Image (cartoon, rainbow, N blue to C red):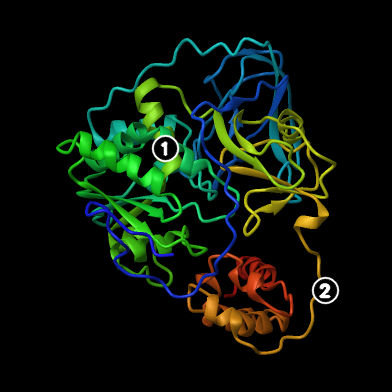
C-alpha cells in the first residue's frame, strides 16, 4: 500500500532496484517507559568496535562507577570503554566472547546494586571542531546500527567536502524496533546531535531517512521540527518504501539524495555522512549530560519469548540474564544477536550484550527452517533481488573454485551481506555465507 505523505514529508529522490518484502513483525514501541535490566555482574569485552582492541585502565579489585573509563587505546581506529554498572572489578581475562576463534580481553564487574554515577563526568564544553571530535571520542560512541565503526573516526574528515548528513532511521530488519523507539521519544536528542555535527563538521544539509512503516515516528519528528522551524531549518525528512535492505548505507544515500557511491569509495567521497538514528540519540544525550555510552536499548523478541519488548541493558550484561528477565515460553532452539537476516547465531547464552547489539531474537523450531542445499536451477531470482546489481550465483561459483581474483573483479567487495539472495533462493543455497567466505579469503590473500 502506498503511503500518503504530507506536504512536508518528501518521498525518495530515487528508488533502488532489488530487495525483498518481509514480514517485519515489529513490536509496539509504546509505552515510552521501558524495562531496565539490573544485572548482578557484567562482562565487558574490550573489542566492541572495528579497529584496535582497548587496554584496561583499571585493575582487579578496583571500585568503579557508572561512566568511568575502564579501557582505552592510543590507536586512531578505536573507541574507549566505560563501566556500565558500579561495583568491583572481579577479573580481567581473555575469552572468546564473539565466537570468532580469537581471544578478547574481558573486564568482569560485580555490581554493588547502587548504579552510582562517576563523579568526574561533566557536560561537554565545545568551542571548535577539535573539541567536538574529542568529545565524540570520549563518549565511546560507535555505529549502533550494527557496524560498530568508531564515530569519532567517521567524523574526522579533512580530505573531502561533505554537504549532507543522513540520519538512517530505516531499521529494515524484522523484529528490531530500537530506532523506531528512539525516533518516537528522543527527537530532541537526535535533532540536536544532527545540528551539532553539521555545525562543527561544516555540513550544510541534514536528512532523516525513514521507512514508510514508521510513519508515527516520522510525524513526531516533523512535529518537533515544525515547532522550532528556524532552529531545524536545514533538516528535512525523506520517507522510503519498506523493502529490505533499505537501511543499507549505500541504499539510504541513493534513496535520500540520488547519489551513488562508486565501487571502492566511501560515502564521504560523494559528500555524505550516514549515522544511525540511535547513534545520534546517544550522541545527543552525551552532549546534554556528559554520560558516555554505558547501556543499550535492545529489542528482545522471537517465538520463545514470553513478553517481547525493548529493554534498556547495561553493556556487558549476559544474554542469559536478559532472556530470564523478559521470560521464556520454552528453551529456545536458536538465539540470534541481531535480526534474522544479518544477525549471528549464538553458541552460548553467556555471551554479553555489546555496544552495537540492537536485538536478541530467541526462536523455537516452528519459527525457522534448516534445509539442505540443492543444485542451482538458474532461475536468476538472486540476481533480481540483489540491490547492488551483482550476480550472486556467478560469484559463488568462482568462490567454490577458489577463483577469488575473479570474484573480486566481478564485484565481490560491493556485496553488502544483506542476505536477500539467500532469502529468495528456491534451491536454499547459502549464497550470503559463500560470499562472506569469499571476502574472508580475499582479505587473507596478500597477492590480490
Q: Residues within 10 Å of mark 1 (few under 14, many from 20)?
A: some
Front residue of this view, candidates 435 and 103: 435
Secondary element type, mark 1: helix
The image quadrant that residue 39 belongs to is: top right
- Give the number of the mark in front: 1 or 2: 1
Viewer can see residue 391: no
| Relative horizontal placement of residue 366, taking residue 192 as reference (left or right) | right
Residue at the image position 76 percent from the left and 59 percent from the top:
368
Point out the tag, 1 or 2, that comes first from the N-terminus: 1
Measured Cα–Cα span from mark 1 to mark 2: 42 Å
The quadrant of the image that shows the N terminus is: bottom left
Is there any visible trace of residue 402 in the rendered image?
Answer: yes
**x and y percentages locating residue 190 in the rendered image:** 36, 37
Residue 372: image tag: 2
Residue 426 lies left or right of residue 283; in this view the side is right
Q: Quadrant of the C terminus?
A: bottom right
Residue situated in front as seen by the camera: 45 or 225? 225
**Left or right relative to 2: residue 90:** right
In this view, 74 is above or below 340:
above
Q: How many marks?
A: 2
Please rate how many residues cluster around mark 2, counting C-alpha atoms within 10 Å: few if below 14, some from 14 to 19, many from 20: few
Residue closest to the far left = 230
Residue 152 point in image, percent of width and height = 40, 41
- Rendered residue at 32%/69% (across/down): 14
210 up-or-down from 405: above or below: above
- Residue 257 position, x and y percent, is 29, 63
Which residue was labeled with disc 1? 184
Amino acid at each position: 500500500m502506498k503511503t500518503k505523505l504530507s506536504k512536508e514529508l518528501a518521498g525518495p529522490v530515487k528508488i533502488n532496484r532489488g530487495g525483498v518484502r518481509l514480514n517485519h513483525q515489529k513490536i509496539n514501541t509504546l509505552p515510552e517507559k521501558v524495562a531496565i535490566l539490573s544485572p548482578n555482574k557484567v562482562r565487558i569485552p574490550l573489542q566492541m568496535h572495528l579497529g584496535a582492541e582497548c587496554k584496561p585502565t583499571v585493575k582487579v579489585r578496583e571500585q568503579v562507577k557508572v561512566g568511568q573509563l575502564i579501557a582505552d587505546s592510543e590507536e586512531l581506529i578505536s573507541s574507549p570503554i566505560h563501566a556500565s554498572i558500579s561495583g568491583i572489578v572481579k577479573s580481567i581475562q581473555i575469552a572468546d566472547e564473539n565466537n570468532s576463534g580469537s581471544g578478547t580481553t574481558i573486564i568482569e564487574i560485580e555490581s554493588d546494586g547502587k548504579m552510582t554515577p562517576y563523579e568526574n563526568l561533566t557536560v561537554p564544553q565545545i568551542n571548535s571542531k577539535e573539541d567536538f571530535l574529542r568529545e565524540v571520542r570520549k563518549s565511546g560512541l560507535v555505529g549502533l546500527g550494527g557496524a560498530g565503526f568508531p564515530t569519532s573516526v567517521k567524523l574526522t574528515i579533512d580530505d573531502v567536502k561533505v554537504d549532507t548528513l543522513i540520519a538512517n532511521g530505516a531499521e529494515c530488519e524484522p523484529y528490531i524496533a530500537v530506532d523506531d523507539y528512539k525516533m518516537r521519544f528522543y527527537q530532541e536528542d537526535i535533532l540536536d546531535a544532527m545540528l551539532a555535527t553539521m555545525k562543527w563538521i561544516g555540513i550544510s544539509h541534514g536528512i532523516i531517512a525513514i521507512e514508510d512503516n514508521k510513519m508515527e515516528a516520522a510525524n513526531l519528528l516533523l512535529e518537533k521540527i515544525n515547532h522550532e522551524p528556524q532552529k531545524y531549518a536545514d533538516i528535512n525528512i525523506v520517507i522510503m518504501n519498506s523493502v529490505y535492505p533499505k537501511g543499507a548505507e549505500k541504499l539510504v544515500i541513493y534513496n535520500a539524495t540520488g547519489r551513488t557511491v562508486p565501487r571502492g569509495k566511501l560515502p564521504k567521497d560523494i559528500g555524505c555522512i550516514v549515522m544511525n538514528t540511535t547513534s545520534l540519540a546517544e550522541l545527543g544525550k552525551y552532549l546534554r549530560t556528559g554520560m558516555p555510552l554505558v547501556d543499550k536499548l535492545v529489542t528482545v523478541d522471537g517465538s520463545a519469548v514470553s513478553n517481547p519488548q525493548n529493554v534498556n541493558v547495561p553493556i556487558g550484561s549476559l544474554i542469559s540474564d536478559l532472556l530470564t528477565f523478559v521470560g521464556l515460553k520454552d528453551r529456545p532452539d536458536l538465539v540470534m544477536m541481531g535480526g534474522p537476516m544479518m544477525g549471528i547465531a549464538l553458541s552460548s547464552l553467556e555471551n554479553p550484550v555489546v555496544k552495537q547489539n540492537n536485538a536478541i531474537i530467541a526462536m523455537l523450531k516452528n519459527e525457522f527452517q534448516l534445509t539442505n542445499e540443492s543444485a542451482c536451477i538458474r532461475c536468476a531470482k538472486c540476481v533480481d533481488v540483489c540491490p547492488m546489481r551483482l550476480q550472486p550465483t556467478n560469484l559463488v561459483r568462482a568462490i567454490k573454485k577458489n577463483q577469488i581474483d575473479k570474484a573480486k573483479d566481478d564485484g565481490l567487495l560491493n556485496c553488502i551481506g544483506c542476505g536477500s539472495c539467500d532469502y529468495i533462493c528456491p534451491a536454499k543455497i547459502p549464497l550470503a555465507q559463500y560470499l562472506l567466505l569469499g571476502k574472508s579469503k580475499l582479505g587473507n590473500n596478500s597477492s590480490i
